[in-house]
Amino acid sequence: MATQPTKLTPKELSKRPERLSPGHRLCAGCGASIIVRQMLAAIDDPVVIANATGCLEVGTTIYPYTAWRVPWIHNAFENAASTISGVEAAYRSLVRQGKIPEQNVKFLAFAGDGGTYDIGIQALSGAVERGHQFLYVCYDNGAYMNTGIQRSSATPFGAHTTTSPAGKVIPGKQQFRKDLTAIMAAHNIPYVAQAAPSKWKDLMQKTRKAVNCGGAAFMNVLASCNRGWRHGTDETIELTQLAVDACYWPLYEVEDGEWRLTYKPKEKRPVEEWLKRQGRFRHVFRPENRHMIDELQAEVDLRWERLLRLCGEA
Amino acid sequence: MELKGWRDIPIGGMILEAGNAVEYLTGGWRAFRPVFGQAGCIHCMQCWLFCPDSSILVDPDNEKMVGFDLNYCKGCGICASICPVNVKIIKKAKGAGEELAQDDPRLCIRTVEEGKFEE
Amino acid sequence: MSKFEALTGNDAVATAMRQINPDVMAAYPITPQTSTVQKFADFVSDGLVDTEFVCVESEHSAMSACVGASAAGARVMTATSANGLALMWEIVYIAASNRCPIAMSLVNRALSAPINIHCDHSDVMGMRDAGWIIFFSENGQEAYDNIIQAIRIGEHPDVLLPVAVCQDGFITSHGMERVEIYEDAEVKAFVGTYRPQWPLLDLEHPKTLGPLDFYDYYYEHKRQQIEAMENAQRVILEVTGEFNKKFNRNYSLFEPYRLEDAEVAVIAVNSTAGTVKVVVDQLRDEGLKVGLLKPRLFRPFPAQELASALGHLKAVVVMDRSVSFGAMDNAGPLFLELVAALTLHGVQVPMADYVYGLGGRDILPREIERVYRDALKMAETGRVERLVTYLSVRE
Amino acid sequence: MAELTEIRWHGRGGQGVVTAGKLLAETALGSGQYFQAFPDYGPERMGAPIRAFTRISSKPITIHSQIEEPDVVLVLDPTLLGIVPVTKGLKEDGTLLVNTPMSPAEVRDVTGFHSGKVFTVGASHIAIEEMGREITNTPMLGAFARATGLFDIEDLSEQLRAWFGKKISAEIVEANVRAMRRAAEEVQQG
């Protein structure tokens, strides 16, 4: 009798052994480790994980210590997807040849937005196009946080980073965030989703769909970073949810090409409310920059309307 | 862990003791600490869900939240901010908390192995 | 019973790969190695191998997937050339330091720019210090023999290093020659099954591979790599000996050709060594005491053995098919390493370097004959007129 | 059998020049000889003039350089005569074999090669008649065998069957064999 999957309630989940041990060196209040803990808690099957270079990798495996209680490999910055595709190919081959038993192993790759939107997008696109059975998770904290908050294509419009500083002439990042989730949906793979740890059940249900979709899956998960976003260490979950309610980070899934909204805020918050709480946007509240808030709001609305249409909700 | 020579470590940079990060106590990072009103707790385990450092201690048999693992808690205060009980029973207090540990019954310091809870 | 076939160097290597039947092959096409991967793809789609063939989107991902698969516990092979190897650069070093015994067919081709699809050794010479074991092959037969041995050498517990087997792009990779192909069962028996000691897919003993090393441990891990490279020569001779016995071959660290009683010798690798042999025979017919030393193993570099094999000579000339730009006299890397090896092992002999064949330019017997005449003059006068000569470059 | 015979093929991309070289190599293998067959690779686009090289010997061949002074030159495409210096480096007593309706004498005038032996054969014509397509490499092999005496027609026929056996229908294989044997008969020397 196939054992029943663990019920998705905090009580039941809290009984399962932690796969990411305490003692890792991610910053206090880090969104990424919450995401990893929640997603791994949702997967009952054995997992093998690849990481790209980045905060998660650095913070969890400073030799001779490792916080990983599951098989884990880091290769380089731009190849989490191709590395895990090699591990998955080995598993497929060794099982097919009867050299190791089939153990329903789930293969995951975790990488930050820099490692996914920018330097790793080619390996990601290649691996999903080849149809390896794995889930690629991007913990999107909106910049190269590990190396000191440099701008990535995931950095929000207007945000201050060390390579898109809020200067007198150029006030912060001038481009809108690359919509990577839509790009991955265009790969027509079985499962793509955007999620956030503040809506933990939604994140966990999506994780389960992703690891059981029978093919390549991609999840983009908002990971607040109090260092980079400049907010209090205790505001991680609150600000993550505010981004969702402001529809800057909508929660939806694309299952076999079917777009479905999985959360609709009762009251859509103005994006300004989210910006106001973060030091990286302080400069847009100066009179001469306020227009940037409107530009960002317009873009957020444009993308939100488009998403509603795609999900048949408009 | 005292430093080993090259003949005494696995080759290829491998780490063979999974999860040995538990030997590294990050509790020392705290500037704030969680203070816990055990009586008012409804054991909803939200704090367990949102703790970045797996530092919420759980008694799985009785499905109860029983305290914080101050060996690792970095004092971020997320548990305090998301605790759904209207009168916040987890507060973010100044100080790392060690000096209060001994006398304050509400603070429970436990070392945790594999998520199991030991007295 | 082995059989003789008309095979290009690429097809010979592909045949070896089929017989080895690796668990995973991750590769990306690049001239001139491509027909190896094409041939292997036929084997895969005809069900002649059990290999999981990962057709990646770039060489960077080829080596990345190889590292993932090898770490997982699979026997892994790949093939590349020139710019492809250059794109793998970051991961070539990681493969070696993760101690992944990946076997790679490296079909030598000039590095860009300008882009050039023909043969020279700038690619392998560029990665010679990355921690890989490196073999040279004069022709398709040697590439076939070397890559079979590479599996056993790389996977030996005292070594556990990746191995690159070189051959010359187009000249031998696309040149069809007579190749002796051993029986499948014999090759299979020789390579045996791969028993990884710490496979990532061992769920009972979860491992972390690729941690962050600070300055407290990085050096120790590198010292382990040095130890592996030091063990490699012994293991290579053991495996080579076993191979020679089983398949009636005569491989070693290098091949001396009419060297014992020679006064002067040329040192050349890969296909050019074959052309040099023809010239040696001609000059020997004229009564001139000339010989050739053809290195096979390049990393680890058998300095001691090379020095003792060349100790008796009156002049030594090295032929380099690449240039170390900005190194002493802009000489070639093979020359620079041999100068060091000989000098430090007490062999004081006039030495000169002839850089030739860059970007596939042909090297003709008469040009090699001139090299020998220069060497004979050097032996006579004891003087080196020109340390580095760029053969056949138009002034 | 001369110890080492060096052969240069001239043709255009897509005319099976490289395949012809390999066919010859397989035949040499069959008769216990050593050989090398290698193309002069450039971007071999359809129609572009290309060269291929073959060496055949009774002893192992270790040389790995281009052939500068071939013993035999074969020209698969007559239109190359005016464009490519096909006889460059051809040995004094060498053999030139051209697929052309011209006579050997006319070929000597066009190429200026007045020594050695010149053979001509209407390989294109034979190919079209026997195979319905202008594939000249197998007929030229027949003419080559006859002109140089290096190979026996029967061996070549067997080799063709073995080589094409799996790849194309028996009917086309036989057409190739017929074309090859006809070229062997119809080749003229002058």
Image: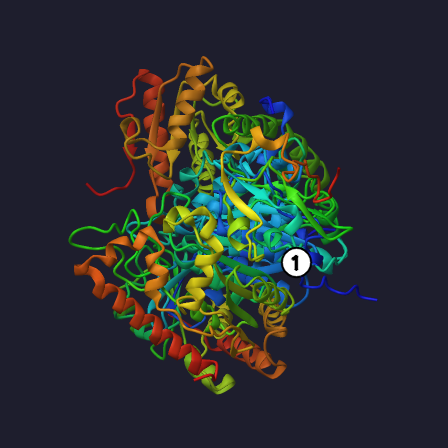
Q: Name the residue beneath numbered marker 1.
A: A10
Left or right: C132 as drawn, with respect to D43: right
Q: Report the chain holding disc 1.
A: A
- Quarter that holds the C terminus of chain D: bottom left
For image coordinates 61% across by 27% down, the residue present is C231
Check the image and report above or below for C139 versus C314: below
Q: Position of residue D58 (x, y in %)?
A: 56, 50
Left or right: C361 as drawn, with respect to C184: left
Within-10-Å neighbours for mark 1: few <14, some 14–19, many 20+: many
Q: Nearer the viewer, residue A307 or A134?
A: A307
Q: Position of residue D108 (x, y in %)?
A: 30, 68
Choose top left, top right, bottom left or bottom right for residue D178.
bottom right
Q: Position of residue C388 (x, y in %)?
A: 29, 29
Check the image and report above or below for D178 versus A1: below
Choose top left, top right, bottom left or bottom right for residue C305.
top right
Q: Nearer the viewer, residue B48 or C271?
A: B48
Check the image and report above or below for C26 versus B118: below
